Image (cartoon, grey):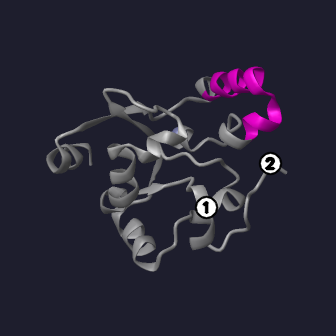
């Protein structure tokens, strides 16, 4: 995907974060709780044991050189717009879209992509379904219960 992006745009992107262990996720979450409180942390950082990063199927992508890393404005960079449009071709899903916050329970994360395989990503793209919750008919997950 990164090679295709570079071939198509002449620009580069990089992995910011991919697999995280429980201990690493614990550290990320605790840091967010310390900085902004648990309620705020729960909207943008998964509690340890629930992060897609712990499955090895999620990746946070940023521009290279870095611009708007892990920020909503990444969605307006060439990298962000290209990924939102093309990631499905490579089996990735923009996991937390801006218009699906009540369904995913996460704030808009234009940098966070979840690998679901080309077959599923293509089917979801073709049917205009943008979240796993909607595709699998799962209840919305607006908050931790
Ligand atoms: Zn992420």
Magenta segment main secondary structure:
helix
Classify mark 1: residues with Cα within 10 Å, few (<14), some (14-19) or many (20+). Answer: few
Q: Which circle, 2 or 1, is nearer the viewer?
A: 1
Q: Position of residue 134 (x, y in %)?
A: 61, 71
Q: Does the numbered disc 1 mark a residue whose Cβ is under 8 Å from ligand 1?
A: no
Residue 34 vs residue 121: left or right? right
Q: Position of residue 141 (x, y in %)?
A: 73, 58
Q: Is residue 130 above or below residue 78?
A: below
Q: Are marks 2 and 1 in contact (CB under 8 Å)?
A: no
Q: Secondary structure at mark 1?
A: helix
Q: Is residue 84 magenta?
A: no
Which residue has dot 1 on it? Answer: 99
The boundaries of the magenta stretch are: 25-42
User: Can see residue 58?
Assistant: no
Residue 138 vs residue 122: left or right? right
- Which numbered circle lies on residue 144? 2
Q: Position of residue 138 (x, y in %)?
A: 68, 69
Q: Quadrant of residue 124?
A: bottom left
User: Which residue occupies 53% across, 36% down?
Assistant: 71
- Which numbered circle lies on residue 112? none
Q: Is residue 121 above or below residue 35?
A: below
Q: Is residue 111 above or below residue 91?
A: above
Q: Secondary structure at mark 2?
A: loop
User: Which residue occupies 45% across, 57% down?
Assistant: 93
Q: Is residue 114 above or below residue 33?
A: below
User: Which residue occupies 32% across, 59% down?
Assistant: 86
Q: Quadrant of residue 142?
A: bottom right
CA separation, marks 2 and 1?
Answer: 19 Å
User: Which residue occupies 33% across, 52% down?
Assistant: 82
Classify mark 2: residues with Cα within 10 Å, few (<14), some (14-19) or many (20+). Answer: few
Residue 140 vs residue 1: left or right? right
Q: Between residues 11 and 17, which one lies in front from this camera angle?
A: 11
């Amino acid at each position: 995907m990164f090679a295709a992006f570079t071939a198509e745009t002449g620009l580069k992107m990089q992995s910011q974060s991919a697999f995280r262990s429980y201990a690493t996720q614990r550290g990320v979450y605790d840091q967010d709780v310390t900085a902004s409180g648990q309620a705020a942390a729960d909207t943008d950082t998964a509690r340890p044991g629930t992060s897609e990063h712990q499955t090895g199927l999620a990746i946070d992508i940023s521009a290279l050189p870095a611009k708007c890393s892990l920020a909503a404005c990444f969605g307006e960079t060439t990298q962000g717009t290209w990924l939102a449009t093309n990631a499905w071709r490579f089996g990735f899903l923009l996991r937390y879209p801006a218009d699906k916050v009540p369904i995913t329970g996460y704030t808009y994360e234009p940098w966070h992509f979840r690998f679901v395989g080309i077959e599923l990503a293509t089917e979801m793209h073709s049917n205009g379904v943008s979240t796993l919750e909607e595709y699998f008919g799962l209840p919305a997950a607006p908050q931790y219960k």
